Amino acid sequence: MIGTIRRHQKWLWGIIIAATIFSFVYYLSPTQRYGAGQGYRDSSNPDLGSVNGEPITVDQLRAAEREARLFYFLRTHVWPDSAEQTKQIRNMAEQGLVVQSLLKDYHITATTEAAARFTKQIFGVPPDQSMPLDKFNDWVQNELMRRGGLTLDDFDRFARHQAAQDYLMSLFGMSGKLITPKEAEFFYRRENEPMVTDIVSFPTSNFYAATAPSDAELQDYFTKHEAEYRLPDRVQINFVVFEPSNYMAKADTLLGTNVSEKAAELYHQQGPDAFKDESGKNLSETEAVAKLQKQMRQYAAFQEARKAANEFLSTLTLGHDDTHPFSTSDLAKLAKTRNLAVKTTEPFDEKDGCKDLVLPAKAMHVLFSLRDDAPDDPEKAMLYPSSPLPGETNVYVAGLQKRFPSQLQLLASVRDQVLKDYRDSKALALAKDAGDKFAGAAQVGLQQGKSFDALCAAQNLKPVALSPFALVATNPPPGLDRLSFQHLQESVFSLPAEASSRFIPTTDGGMVAYMKARLAVDADRMKQELPYYLARMREQRQVAAFQEWLSRQIQLRLIPPPGDQTGAG
């Protein structure tokens, strides 16, 4: 790890703190964590396609995939683990290699200062402020490495490539910045024009009393939706927990007696502004040093727990081959000799997970790949993951107890849920039907010169007047959730004054809206905000122009591997 920091010390050393003293890059890399990997990793000479006439190597694609994983996380706040997400990562990685070839051709290399600025942008830190190092360190350990399975090398490479891509974008997205202030003012007025609106709601609760089904109706509904109540594939897992708290004494021994001095040295290297509490207030030196010491102890103890889990798993694998295969009882036999407890989960599916195993989605996917019936596995090695599984707070050695294949259920066993689903869907259909009828009648009545209030009164409906809102408003009015408010904004945006909308679905039924009037934009506010709005529009259009140019470059430069045409699009 020290070597990693030294390679990136020009800008990363100003970010990384205490716990990175210990070597944690190797054992937290994806291939070491779970023994998992893409099929092309095992091929001696795979055809991975080419970029600009140069064959893609395994190492290039592997590095690009890891950058793509980080990009995906920063965009979605979840790590990609599903099969569909894996395809996206492969596609993004191939496109990333095209970007790297363009950077090379145009001799664009990000400076260390640019990489540091980009890193601050990721975390929303202004350029003139210091990085909150304690929070960044926590993110590196728990998010980047433990959950994401990436390393500081990956982060460094990603930051530099993204910063360099900004230079590329400034060159080839320039045409998108040619929007005039007058054009920006037009769009600003459209998006910020306050709309005075009434709504008539049709909540499903108003129709629930009319949804009680007969036995025949319920059976018919269940038959048509039987697949939705099918039990998914489930597994039952045996596991041993290695808790870092049991290794604190050993961690203290490894850290030595001068741990407080190490923490104090790091504190003074980074400065007081790097350590803040939840409210953003600087921690005192005593508080910051104590926090650093705690992080150092926790991380060292976690590392020791994982070492113990590795040793346990290595012992578990001894003596097994095709004639002496693994069995589900191996874990319990070895644990007994170590006075360790073996726990067994209830059957669980991959989507909902297991309350007894606090693991990231990628580790859960590993557990669901375990089996004892693989025809090419006479050793039955697939009963156990090839590596311990690091969780949020503990490390696990796990093994398969039993698989439960997906199966259909009888109505009797899920009757309560089916009844609820039937009544919810029926109430929603009745609400939509009533809303559609009123929307049609309102449009006809308004064309005939009738008032919206009169049309509502004729059907015993009460319109609700909303406070004026604009298209860019984000705070929903009382009674509407954010998604329903977005649907309302999109539906009324194109309406002229004194016109009504179609039926607008919401999360609990629907509504019909009436546009009473459009108000003038606040001139003083527009004068103040327009320069920032213009800058944002130019930036957005620059990105769009660059993406259009880059799409053409991908088509020209990227030749995907045989049978894989995803990267060419």
Image (cartoon, grey):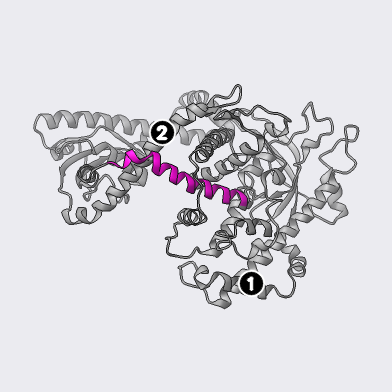
The reply, left or right, for residue 64 in relation to residue 472 is right
Q: Nearer the viewer, residue 91 or 96?
A: 96
Q: Which one is in front in this view, the residue at disc 2 or the one at disc 1?
A: 2
Q: Is residue 72 in view?
A: yes
Binning the other alpha carbons within 10 Å of mark 1 as few (below 14), some (14 to 19) or many (20 upward) gives: many
Residue 211: say if magenta: no
Residue 159: say if magenta: yes
The reply, left or right, for residue 509 in relation to residue 361 is left
Q: Quadrant of residue 398?
A: top right
x%, y% of residue 498? 14, 38
- Kindly state the secondary structure of the residue where label 1 is placed: helix
Mark 1: amino acid? Ala
x%, y% of residue 119? 50, 55
- Ranked by sequence position, the earlier of labels 2 and 1 is 1
Q: Is residue 205 in view?
A: no
Mark 2: amino acid? Trp
Q: Which residue is mark 2?
A: 549
Q: Is residue 116 above or below residue 496?
A: below
The reply, left or right, for residue 81 in relation to residue 39 is left
Q: Is residue 282 above or below residue 379?
A: below
Q: Nearer the viewer, residue 344 or 558?
A: 558
Residue occupying the point 77% across, 55% down: 307
Which stretch did the figure color magenta?
A: 153-178
Q: Which residue is mark 1?
A: 263
